[in-house]
Image (cartoon, helix red, strand yellow):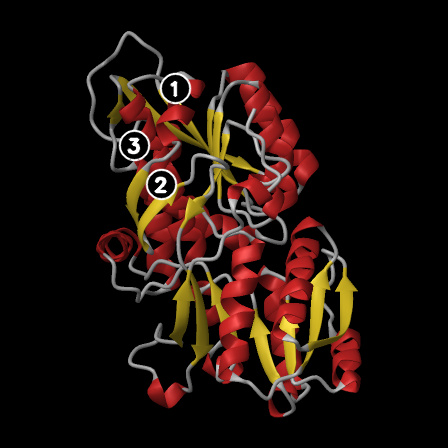
Amino acid sequence: MQRRTLLKAGLALGALGSLPLGAHRAFADQPLTFYGLKSMSGAFASYGKYADMGSRLAIAEHSQLLGHPLKYKVIDTEGNAGKAVRKVQEAIGQDGARFFQGCTLSSSALAVSKEIHKAGGVFMTPVGADEITGKDCNASTFRWSVPTYGAIRETLVPMSRQLPQAKRWYTITPQYVFGDALLDNARKVFAELGVEHIGNSYHSLQEQEFSGYLTNAIAAKPDVLVLLNFGSQASNALRQAVNFGIKERMKVLMVWSAGLDQFQELGSDVLEGVYLGAQYWHQVDTPLNKQLVAATRKAYGINPNYPLAADYIGTKVMLEAIIKAGSLDGAAVSAALQGMRFQGPTGEELIRPGDHQVLKDYYLLRGKPQGQMRDEDDLAEVISSGRSFVEVDHTGCALA
């Protein structure tokens, strides 16, 4: 789809953010406002844009809930935990906000989840840090995406099986809660596999120049370079690695890709032969995913990517839980979410009652050469998929 057309579609749906969605008769009660926590500005604005598009698709499926007109309001987290908390506090204190979905960064989600829980609200997020459904879990917070434990296991283990000769692995890691969680889990898997973790380079959340880290990686002579960063940082690290000729020296794995949008930006020349972890892939053959692909193409003229799919299903499931509960009480909606089974993008998915983690597939993809692509979005093939989750009694979660 041309950018101009996409902009028109986005603006058309964007106008709905401040108005009741769908035709409805007047109600005596106040409208129900659903809040999307999206990084609409800052370093992760691209992610936030698509996440917002996903939530709007789900909101558009309901003109009202329990007799209340349904509104949708975006809170721009700016990819900043402090700003996200202040804005959520304002929404709760000034507007009585109770239902929230989203967040791009684990640090933001961990911070706002506490505020939403104190207010008796409900929050569903796609962020990755294990703590969300681990030691920092609470009764109000739910997570759709596979956390770092599963992302690491469902990429490193099958890749190691594919490359039994790869014995030396090097990591590049962002130094914050998400990166540390990925690195801790990677070290455990390296030990289990009997391979050597020969080095790690930490970088800040603001870093965009990775030549120094890549030089260190090359000097260590690994068989596999593992990128544990995310979003534009992962894209820049991979692009610079290719410019350094790293693909000719070693295999490359990006554990936590942003999926299709990121792949389109990078292109097949960069992606060819690179291993890519993914929460979602638009070509997966499941009933809900087929519906999502059709709805996304109709609304926006594009195929869905990870942030769009994650915030679509998170919003959709929360709205369905409100209907199931028959109540706008946060505790009642949380109870309806616990143990819920539903058709998700990866197949049948389940919200585990003990820690509020959705059990779903994680994918290992590999970038395709341009000559094998069937269309412009056919940038990768699925190598494996599976579900790896810490048992509830080992997560550190005590719901309260």
Question: What quarter of the picture does the C terminus occupy?
Answer: top right
Task: Determine which quarter of the picture holds residue 15.
Answer: top left
Which residue extends farthest bottom?
248
In the picture of the structure, the residue carrying the numbered disc 3 is 320
* Number of the label disc, if any, that sits on residue 332: 1
Say which element carries label 1: helix
- Give amino acid for label 1: Ala
Foreground pick, 272 / 27: 272
Q: Residue at x 37, y 63 (%)?
A: 281
Work out how far the residue at label 1 is from the one at label 3, CA to CA, in angstroms: 13 Å
Q: Report crowding for label 1: few under 14, some 14 to 19, many 20 or more residues within 10 A (C-alpha).
A: some
Closer to the eye: label 1 or 3: 1
In the picture of the structure, the residue carrying the numbered disc 2 is 56
Q: Position of residue 218 (x, y in %)?
A: 75, 85
Foreground pick, 283 / 190: 190
The answer to the question of whether label 2 and label 3 lie on touching residues, with beta carbons closer than 8 A, is no
Work out how far the residue at label 2 is from the one at label 3, CA to CA, in angstroms: 15 Å
Q: Position of residue 331 (x, y in %)?
A: 44, 19
